[in-house]
Amino acid sequence: MIIALLASVAAALPGVGTAIAQPDDEPTDTIDPESSTGAVGEIVDPSFGPLISIEAVELVGNRTTASRVILRALPIGAGDVLRAGDPRLKRARWKLLALGYFLDVTLALRKGSARGKVILTVAVVERGTVALNRLWFGSSVVAPWWLGADLGDRNFFGTGLAVGGAVAFTGHGAIAGARDQWAGELRVSAPGLGGSRWGVHGAITGQHGSEPFRVGGPLGSSAASDLRAFGYRRLAARAGGSVELTTISDLSADLRVEQIDADVPVAPTRTLPDGRVAAVDLGLRQGQSHVVSLAVGYDRDNRPDPALPHQGTRVQVQAELGSTLLGGSYDFAVLLGRYDRWWPINRRAALGLRLAGGAILGDAPRFDRIHIADVDRLLSPRVLGMTTALTAPLDVLGTDNAETLYGELGGNVVVEYTYRWWRRPHRIYGADAFVAVGLWGLTTADELRVRDRSWWSALPIDAVIDAGLRIDTEIGVFEFTVANALGRVPRW
């Protein structure tokens, strides 16, 4: 029973490229393939070594991945002339690992048919590319049950195409105005078009939802009598392109067009505990409205093992601008960022720092604002954009954290200690135990402008504590954690 409550599936991480290691192996030092160093203390000099010519590239171990997919990802090929110390030889391994198709990649040179000619052998160990990216389930006052799954294939039939989809359903509770909800999504992306640094991607998402909001009761109340709900429909299409800046970083740009049809109540209000009546901002236009926006993103990841990281850094930044000048109904800007850094302590233990946050400017629609579950991992996350729970966060620090559901400024900082339990080369690749502590915060523009209390008392800031086990498998990364249990069962 306890295991069933703790089980969930985290996002399957693309670009997993961990070398096969036994539990007692020493972790290797992080190597940045864009720097001038190879192994620690070793200088990679492009002019070092004899001049060689790549006579041929030999592929070994690719049973399902098409040879052309591997060859077009390599920064070197047959006919290239280079020195034996050329850093492109090291970057080639990182580039292949970044595809996410392989558990390990090994490059070797052997003599060719004549002096000065060599054959490059690329040996790969394939991993399962079909992944269960997310699994949603749980129960709350808002939704007596919800269930959904997100599946993807990072290497569709060995072609290099990435395809994926998700579907989710929820039942409705006793909240007035609530209804059953469902949502679906389809995704496709084609990185490295024609062997170039360019790629394209797109997605279609649809929702038939029911959004709850509070109309009375004490702060943080989730009683059905204190809540109301309104129905909405969303249909969104996203399309864009990406360019590989370096072996470990890329830049993307996207166009989003979305239609929202919401049955928003006229002049909704809430009765506060002291008897006052206050207006409720639901963040949506009545009837049909549109979102048209442009977004740019940057991603840099040099972690050797993104699934169970013990070293390396990942940086993600995204900026989005929606405007009526583009044909939308909302003028807003969104800036989101994430920074993860890992330091190995010894051969088994590592210390991680995770920073994430964002700011929303202007008249952003409700669904583009920061949700409290985006910053507090102890709460139920939105399921394909649908709200399934309104449980108040734990009040660990005694702050006023129960009021804000959607905010314009929020984030968290988490320190995590991870212990490498074991690693294997097949099916179930490894497991890590971890303990995490940190702080989260979420506020609105009104709370920043108007306060009758101190910052500490007025702003929703509190602690987050989590512990559990992560298991990297052929079909995804499973998490058995305290946070997942608390987010999937009702709390009163």
Image (cartoon, grey):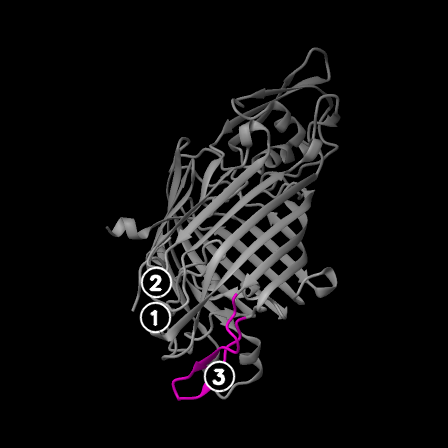
What residue does disc 2 label? 173
Q: Nearer the viewer, mark 2 or mark 3?
A: 2
Q: Classify residue 257 by image quadrant.
A: bottom right
What residue does disc 1 label? 224
Q: Classify residue 466 by image quadrant.
A: bottom left
Give the image location of residue 286, x and y in percent: 57, 69
Q: Residues within 10 Å of mark 2 (few under 14, many from 20)?
A: some
Q: Going 53% across and 54% down the picture, which residue do you hit? A: 341
Residue 281 magenta: yes
Give the image location of residue 246, x and y in percent: 68, 43
Instruction: Please indicate, yes or no, whether residue 372 appears anywhere in the rendered image.
Output: yes
Give the main secondary structure of the magenta stretch.
loop
What residue does disc 3 label? 278
Q: Going 60% across and 37% down the picture, which residue do you hit? A: 94
The three-letter amino acid code for the residue at tag 2 is Gly
Pick whichever, 289 or 320, lies toward us.
289
Q: Is residue 78 left or right of residue 466?
A: right
Highlighted range, magenta:
263-282
Residue 351 magenta: no
Q: Residues within 10 Å of mark 3 (few under 14, many from 20)?
A: few
The three-letter amino acid code for the residue at tag 3 is Ala
